[in-house]
């Protein structure tokens, strides 16, 4: 597994990051630990979690269980090379009492709780799951309206969070602050405030990115390249659509779609046509569609690390089998042609 230096930090991480959001619901603890072992044996030293996990569904009573499962694995294996990223939940989530927004006080409480559940002394990358002011991610882009935002309040909030992050870093509780589900304006503003006020610089950005979801490719990609902010790409298989298992609009038992019929708004009138196109490209070039989709994210102009998630250890083994696949220029050209024909399918 290729390793790379993550952004401006001294963290050396694997090209793949293991996502853990199903640990505790669709993935029981025994198989979760099996996946963690498999990932480590396969060269992955990078894990992503969140205080609101597990998902499908997200519930107040189960929030934090994913971190606790990881913590029990950490305590039993005692790995000294794992890089752990987790997140504080954004405003309005039912995983937090009263849907409380991100604030310095909430952040301190959330960090302490995550440290306890993960059974670590320091969190390597602490991410804001989504901004308090709202986000165009999660299929909200079609009606996105930023006109109600209050710039002065947003800037004051950002400064407060950066100051809190600086304190937590000084106390040895987190190493780096990072973002998730952010916009180009948001990323640029966080970076500007950090530079002008001498506060911690955000390390990375975690946004959705796949063959079917390419909003990142323009302004955000330019910002990330120029500012050396790597993208942690979540849902590189588009919630399983790019595996082909839902092709023909079917719903296998025990699948994510059995719990979430529209896959978070990804099932639309055009999506299966696009999926069929990408499956055809993979077939034409003798590639596994899963391997093609994930390795495509690794080949992008901006530094991109896919967050791979698997419900079962069998699925994870399938993903890991393609970690050395290299996409030829002809494959990338066919993918680009298909994207031009069918962009923004959800």
Image (cartoon, rainbow, N blue to C red):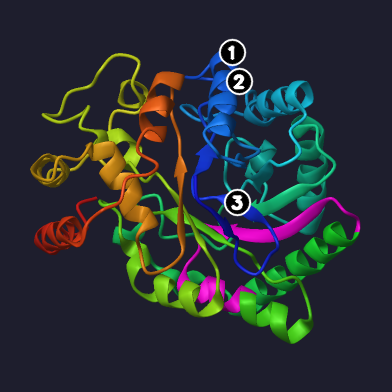
Which residue does the numbered mark 3 point to in the structure image?
Answer: 13
Closer to the camera, 1 or 262? 1
Which residue does the numbered mark 2 point to in the structure image?
Answer: 33
Q: How many numbered discs? A: 3
Which residue does the numbered mark 1 point to in the structure image?
Answer: 30
Q: Are marks 1 and 2 in contact (CB under 8 Å)?
A: yes
Q: Which residues are magenta?
A: 171-190
Q: CA distance from mark 3 to mark 2?
A: 20 Å
Position of residue 221 relative to residue 136, above or below, is below
Closer to the camera, 269 or 271? 271
User: At 14% from the left edge and 59% from the top edge, which residue is drawn?
Assistant: 330
Ranked by sequence position, the earlier of labels 3 and 2 is 3
Q: Is residue 42 magenta?
A: no
Q: CA distance from mark 1 to mark 2?
A: 5 Å
Ranked by sequence position, the earlier of labels 1 and 3 is 3
Position of residue 321 measured from the top left corner of the image (x, y, whole percent): 37, 32
Q: Secondary structure at mark 2?
A: helix
């Amino acid at each position: 597994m290729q390793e790379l230096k993550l952004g401006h930090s001294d963290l050396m991480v694997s090209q793949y990051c293991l996502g853990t959001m199903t640990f505790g619901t669709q993935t029981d603890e025994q198989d979760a630990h099996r996946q963690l072992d498999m990932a480590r044996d396969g060269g992955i030293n990078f894990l992503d979690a969140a205080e609101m996990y597990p998902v499908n569904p997200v519930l107040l009573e189960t929030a934090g269980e994913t971190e606790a499962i990881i913590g029990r694995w950490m305590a039993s294996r005692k790995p000294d090379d794992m890089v752990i990223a987790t997140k504080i939940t954004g405003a309005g989530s039912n995983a937090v009492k009263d849907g409380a927004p991100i604030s310095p006080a909430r952040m301190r409480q959330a960090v302490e709780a995550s440290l306890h559940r993960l059974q670590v002394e320091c969190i390597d990358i602490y991410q804001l799951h989504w901004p308090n002011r709202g986000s165009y991610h999660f299929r909200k882009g079609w009606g996105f309206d930023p006109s109600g935002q209050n710039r002065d309040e947003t800037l004051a909030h950002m400064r407060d969070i950066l100051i809190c992050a600086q304190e937590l870093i000084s106390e040895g509780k987190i190493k780096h602050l990072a973002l998730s589900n952010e916009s180009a304006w948001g990323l640029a503003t966080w970076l500007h405030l950090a530079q002008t006020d001498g506060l911690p610089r955000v390390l990375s950005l975690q946004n959705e990115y796949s063959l079917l979801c390419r909003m990142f490719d323009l302004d955000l990609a330019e910002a990330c390249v120029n500012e050396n902010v790597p993208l942690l790409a979540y849902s590189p298989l588009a919630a399983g659509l790019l595996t082909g298992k839902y092709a023909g609009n079917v719903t296998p038992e025990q699948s994510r779609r059995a719990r979430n019929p529209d896959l978070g708004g990804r099932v639309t009138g055009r999506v299966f046509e696009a999926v069929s196109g990408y499956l055809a490209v993979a077939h034409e070039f003798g590639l596994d569609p899963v391997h093609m989709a994930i390795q495509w994210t690794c080949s992008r102009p901006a530094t991109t690390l896919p967050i791979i998630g698997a419900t079962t250890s069998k699925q994870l083994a399938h993903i890991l089998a393609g970690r050395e696949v290299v996409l030829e220029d002809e494959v990338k050209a066919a993918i680009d042609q298909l994207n031009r024909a069918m962009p923004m399918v959800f």
